[in-house]
């Protein structure tokens, strides 16, 4: 009952903030919700000096709604499936080499470079840190989040090919980054017990297993949908794919995020074309659009409220400020490297690389992975650094990406 009451209060807060944003602030939904939640958190901290019990109550609420467990085990599957079901396979097929390279080579490149830079940066500030722990930060900060930026890109009339690069990369690199993060985490927790082949086998089990599992459950749902014509049952089947598939993926030790992306693309294309009537397709689309909007409202409010749990250490904030610049530079390199690998298939110019760099927003999944770390991994430091990078990414990059797109379009 306590968990239900806490989540109910979060929904009420999200609804109120969404109203305030739509009525007065008028920022893009995700950015506006996080901005208002941040202001609310700052106000709570100030009021907490006079009324500490009020601040304590809100902090306990945020702690009970553990964003790591809530997002990684529950919300992520819904969000990825909701995004994937609207991906057009024909457009994705045209961008397959770019998406594949960005979400694999790009993630690995970013993980290694960020991890290495953070290792030396922290030592420069006198903070002793193991290299593997820095690599974990590299993995958790590498996935990009298109939720806040895609609406802005559409308003700026960005070419569909670039939109698909950003959307496709983010859907797949979320899953890949989680697999990389979990692999490094297992190695760090059991140092010396993993060889190169063990690491490769673990990665293959999670990644390839997740893709195969997503294809299997997506195809089963497709067969069931094709045998009937009832939009209520077919919406329920799509919901079963996410809820049943996500929980089963955990039990099988395969990547749930990758499974949801693959299942969503299969149902959103093959399923809509061969198994759904026009009425069913409309209801399925609207149902998942609403799920996406509601969960994103909750997620970005929760990200804003996480400020209440961040330790205000001046040194950590100084490191975080430098990390923002370093991670942006690494982001450019991590999209430039894949661009060179696919240059015979498709040429990505400097303007495209700049848009991919600045449009590569970090989001809730990075914070969730940071929070999931144990105290033996200097959890407080990584949460603070992740929060600083994510906040800058969403508020600064998210608010300026539209202007950048328009400026580059005129160049």
Image: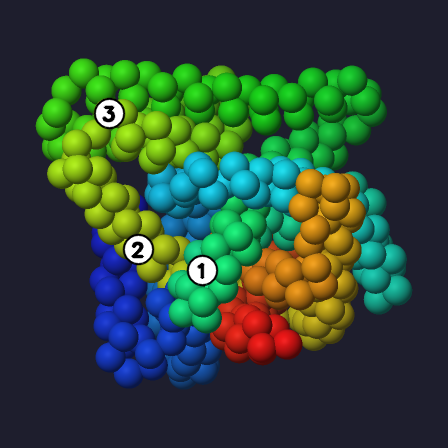
Residue, disc 2: 293
Image quarter (top left, top right, bottom left or bottom right) of the C terminus = bottom right
Q: Residue at x 32, y 16 (%)?
A: 220
Question: Neighbour class for label 3 at 10 Å: few (<14), some, many (≥20)?
Answer: many
Q: How is the image coloured?
A: rainbow
Where on the picture, by quarter, is residue 203?
A: top right
- Alpha carbon separation for disc pair 2 and 3: 26 Å
Q: Residue at x 52, y 37 (%)?
A: 93
Q: Residue at x 76, y 63 (%)?
A: 329
Q: Is residue 74 visible?
A: no
Task: Check the image and report above or below for 63 versus 48.
Answer: above
Disc 2, SS: helix
Q: If you read the primary sequence from the N terminus, does the residue marked by circle 2 or circle 3 appear first?
A: 3
Q: Are marks 1 and 2 in contact (CB under 8 Å)?
A: no
Of residues 155 and 84, the one drawn nearer to the viewer in this rendering: 155
Of residues 59 and 217, the one drawn nearer to the viewer in this rendering: 217
- Alpha carbon separation for disc pair 3 and 1: 28 Å
Q: If you read the primary sequence from the N terminus, does the residue marked by circle 3 or circle 1 appear first?
A: 1
Of residues 373 and 53, the one drawn nearer to the viewer in this rendering: 373
Residue 154 image position (x, y, % from top left): 42, 64
Question: Neighbour class for label 1 at 10 Å: few (<14), some, many (≥20)?
Answer: many
Task: Check the image and report above or below for 73 versus 68.
Answer: above
Residue, disc 3: 275
Residue 225 image position (x, y, % from top left): 22, 22
Disc 1, SS: helix
Q: If you read the primary sequence from the N terminus, does the residue marked by circle 1 or circle 2 appear first?
A: 1
Residue 378 image position (x, y, % from top left): 69, 51
Residue, disc 1: 150
């Amino acid at each position: 009952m306590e968990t239900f009451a806490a989540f109910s209060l979060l929904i009420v807060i999200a609804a109120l903030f969404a109203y305030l944003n739509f009525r007065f602030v008028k920022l893009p939904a995700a950015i506006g919700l996080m901005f208002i939640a941040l202001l609310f958190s700052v106000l709570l901290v100030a009021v907490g000096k006079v009324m500490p019990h009020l601040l304590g109550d809100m902090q306990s609420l945020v702690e009970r709604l553990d964003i790591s467990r809530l997002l990684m085990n529950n919300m992520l599957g819904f969000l990825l499936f909701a995004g994937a079901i609207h991906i057009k396979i024909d457009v994705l097929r045209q961008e397959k080499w770019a998406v594949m390279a960005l979400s694999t080579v790009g993630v690995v490149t970013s993980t290694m470079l960020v991890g290495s830079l953070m290792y030396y940066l922290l030592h420069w500030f006198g903070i002793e840190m193991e290299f593997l722990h820095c690599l974990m930060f590299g993995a958790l900060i590498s996935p990009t989040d298109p939720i806040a930026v895609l609406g802005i890109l559409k308003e700026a009339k960005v070419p569909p090919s670039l939109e698909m690069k950003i959307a496709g990369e983010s859907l797949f690199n979320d899953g890949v980054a989680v697999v990389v993060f979990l692999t490094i985490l297992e190695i760090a927790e059991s140092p010396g017990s993993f060889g190169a082949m063990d690491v490769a086998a673990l990665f293959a089990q999670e990644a390839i297993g997740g893709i195969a599992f997503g294809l299997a459950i997506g195809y089963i749902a497709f067969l069931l949908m094709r045998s009937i014509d009832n939009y209520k049952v077919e919406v329920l089947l799509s919901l079963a794919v996410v809820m049943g598939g996500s929980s089963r993926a955990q039990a099988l030790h395969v990547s749930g995020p990758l499974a949801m992306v693959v299942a969503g693309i299969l149902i959103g294309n093959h399923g809509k074309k061969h198994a759904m009537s026009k009425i069913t397709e409309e209801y399925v689309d609207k149902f998942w659009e609403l799920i996406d909007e509601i969960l994103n409202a909750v997620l970005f409010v929760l990200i804003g409220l996480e400020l209440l749990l961040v330790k205000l250490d001046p040194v950590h904030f100084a490191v975080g400020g430098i990390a923002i610049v370093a991670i942006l530079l690494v982001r450019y390199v991590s999209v430039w490297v894949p661009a060179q690998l696919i240059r015979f298939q498709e040429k990505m110019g400097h303007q495209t690389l700049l848009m991919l760099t600045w449009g590569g927003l970090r989001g809730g999944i990075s914070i969730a992975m940071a929070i999931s770390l144990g105290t033996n991994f200097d959890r407080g430091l990584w949460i603070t650094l992740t929060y600083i990078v994510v906040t800058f990414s969403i508020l600064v990059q998210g608010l300026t990406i539209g202007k950048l797109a328009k400026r580059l379009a005129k160049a």
